Amino acid sequence: MSSSLPLRRRIRALVLAPLLRAIAWLMGRLSWPAVQRFGRAIGYLGWWLTRRERHRALDHLALALPDLSAAQRRRLGRASFLHQGTNLTECLAMLSMSRERLEELIDVEGWEQVAAAQAAGRPILILSAHCGNWELLAALANCRGLGMEVVARSLDASQLNELLLGLRARFGTRTIERSSPGAARQLLKVLRNGRALGMLIDQDTRVAGVWVPFFDHPAYTPVGAAKIALKRQAAVFPSFIERLADGRHHLRFHPALDLPSDPTAATAVMTRAIEEQIRRCPEQWVWMHRRWRRQPPGE
């Protein structure tokens, strides 16, 4: 664990890691509906106990979906917290789940176009966002032999980071840590060798970005996915997973995007695809993230 972390965060991580492992042990022994009920209970507690994140989610909903009433935004914000709690317990259950069981839980649409691009040896970029249970998306793609590597920020607490990396590796997903030395070269190498890369670009992170519209407001958005896809002439498939009412999941691979040659314009096209999915299932996105924390100069 990084010694640069504040003492309180280091203590919290030391407590949280064994707690999550204990919950993972329990989740591995429960039915899938019970796993999801447990997760909703965690999300409900999070809604009431994390005042700052609750208010941030409500503020973002008011910004992005102004036509909703305050009561509707509150119901949607609460549902988002319950969804994220369910994501947590589902992921912990995945630590002891077989590949066969995982595939049983997910209906897949549009896989044939990804498989065709893979068979043709074309570089593939799976474009997604923090919608639905994105870890399930990566796991399913690699259960089907895509060999996708994902780009992600490493967690500050090493024990928690190891837990997350282990979850992905269980289903064959290798993580390229964004801040690691040579990460950019690794990304290009993946596509140069005709393999698949998974990237989520719906957050304001400390990477090179551009301003593009997102819910009718400028949002600072990572531009690396567009630059890499254009450089390697990759097939970019917007891909999103959503939890269904019966507890199963539906994973949809959309047709490859026709990207303009300008990276900013290409990033805007990618972001539009993400916004369409969020509008489709708004309760399954991370409204508590500080998506609009930065604004263009003068705004």
Image (spheres, rainbow, N blue to C red):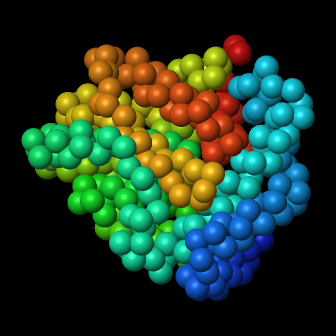
Count of numbered labels shown in the rendering: 0
Horizontal relation, residue 91 to residue 251: left or right: right
Does residue 50 appear in this view? no
Residue 263 vertical position relative to residue 248 in the rendered view, above or below: above
User: Where in the figure is residue 91, as x and y percent of width and height?
Assistant: 54, 67
Q: Nearer the viewer, residue 140 or 160?
A: 140
Residue name at image x 71 percent, y 67 percent: 37
* Rendering quarter of residue 296: top right
- In this view, the residue farthest toward the front is 246
User: Where in the figure is residue 79, as x and y percent of width and height?
Assistant: 75, 48
Q: Nearer the viewer, residue 18 or 182?
A: 18
Residue name at image x 63 percent, y 45 percent: 284
* Rendering quarter of residue 77: top right
Q: Quadrant of the N terminus?
A: bottom right
* Rendering quarter of residue 297: top right
Residue name at image x 77 percent, y 71 percent: 8
Does residue 230 appear in this view? yes
User: Where in the figure is residue 168, as x and y percent of width and height?
Assistant: 41, 67
